[in-house]
Amino acid sequence: MKLPFDHFDLIAGWYDRLLHSAADDGLRDALAAQPGGWLLDVGGGTGALSAPLAAAGVRVAVCDLSRGMARQAHAKGLRALLGSVARLPFADGSVERLLVVDAFHHFTRPSPTVQVQAAFELLRVLQPGGRLVIQEMDIRRPGVKALALGEKLLLMGSRFLTPAQLVTLFEAAGARMLAQQPSGSAVIFVFTR
């Protein structure tokens, strides 16, 4: 059952204060984004994590499925695109850096097979030698299991993968993993193609 509203549209105005802070050093190091280079923040919501990178001179675009989130990112002066990870509005091999933070488990609309499409699509737009950095909550941790249950009760349609499942999915899509490191209750993955 799907609700007749978008959860993220409802919380967009409060999202930054409630849920996110600036990108930590682990994400920044993993991205290795340089001033003047391009970063696409997919499922980036309000741009809370990529705005500090934009302030440091990285050219940032945020792509999100939620209109409310995209409006908040645009209000911060970021390029904000409304779009699905299943069909990104970019040419093959056109993006130097891709960032997906705490969003991959939400890539389930209109069906859970979108996660498979997302892996191929993210790699399609990534430049050869570029970096795709994904941070996902580790579903093996008890606190994350509770979060997953809460999202299920809220009918959010989330589908959390284990770290091994996520790596297998991206390698099957043609990615090569450069690094995997724990980050609190999450894991940071760095892929290239």
Image (cartoon, grey):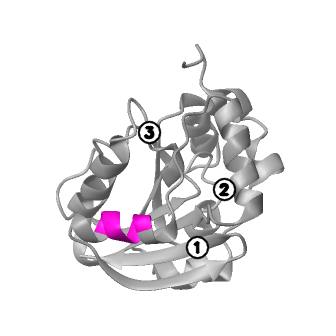
Residue 48, disc: 2
Q: SS of the residue at dot 3?
A: loop
Q: Residue at x 70, y 31 (%)?
A: 153
Name the side, left or right, on which 156 lies relative to 185.
left
Earlier residue among tags 3 and 2: 2
Real-space Cα distance between discs 1 and 2? 19 Å
Q: Quarter of the image containing the C terminus?
A: bottom left
Q: Amino acid at mark 1?
A: Val
Extreme residue toward the left, this view: 92
Earlier residue among tags 1 and 2: 2
Real-space Cα distance between discs 1 and 3? 20 Å
Residue 35 visible in this rendered orientation of the protein: no
Residue 143 visible in this rendered orientation of the protein: yes
Q: Residue at x 58, y 73 (%)?
A: 187
Residue position for label 1? 187
Q: Nearer the viewer, residue 189 or 43?
A: 189
Q: Position of residue 178 (x, y in %)?
A: 38, 86
Residue position for label 3? 108
